[in-house]
């Protein structure tokens, strides 16, 4: 079967996953996400583990954001004194 390409769709390993302008930030983000998920799926990782890992990453990011917010809030209060 011949490989077809459509505008704004870039074939990657015979999969049409890219629907963004090539090499744009969106294109790279989706490519990185696809590669990460492909690694999990290729290693036959259970769906619950995939979900737990995603939630763990989100929670870690959220914790760092909260810590930064509180640090800046404390600085603001000290500057106002």
Image: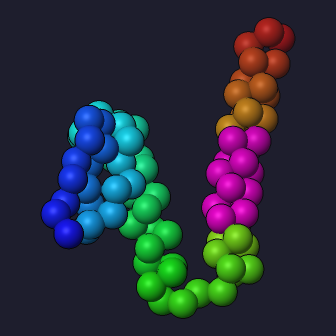
Query: In which quarter of the view is residue 12 placed?
Result: bottom left
- In magenta segment, residue 59: yes
Identify the image quadrant of the N terminus. bottom left
Identify the image quadrant of the C terminus. top right
Q: Where is residue 66 in the image (x, y as percent from the top left)?
A: 76, 42
Residue farthest to the front, as pictured: 1
Query: In which quarter of the view is residue 52 placed?
Result: bottom right
The span shown in magenta is 54-67
Q: Which residue is drawn at 46% across and 58% down?
A: 33
- Position of 45 compared to 33: left or right? right
- Position of 47 compared to 32: left or right? right
Q: Position of residue 36 (x, y in %)?
A: 45, 68
Q: Which of 71 and 25 is in front in this view?
A: 25
Q: How many labels does the image show?
A: 0
Q: Where is residue 2 in the image (x, y as percent from the top left)?
A: 16, 63
Query: Could you tell me if residue 75 is visible in this image?
Result: yes
User: Is residue 3 placed above or below 23 in the rendered structure?
Assistant: below
Q: Main secondary structure of the magenta part?
A: helix
User: Is residue 11 placed above or below 24 in the rendered structure?
Assistant: below
Query: In which quarter of the view is residue 17 placed?
Result: bottom left
């Amino acid at each position: 079967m011949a490989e077809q390409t459509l505008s704004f769709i870039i074939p990657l390993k015979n999969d049409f996953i890219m629907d963004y302008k090539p090499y744009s930030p969106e294109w790279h983000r989706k490519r990185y996400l696809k590669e990460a998920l492909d690694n999990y799926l290729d290693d036959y990782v259970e769906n619950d583990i995939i979900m737990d890992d995603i939630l763990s990453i989100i929670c870690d990011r959220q914790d760092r954001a909260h810590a930064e917010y509180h640090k800046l809030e404390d600085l603001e209060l000290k500057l106002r004194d």
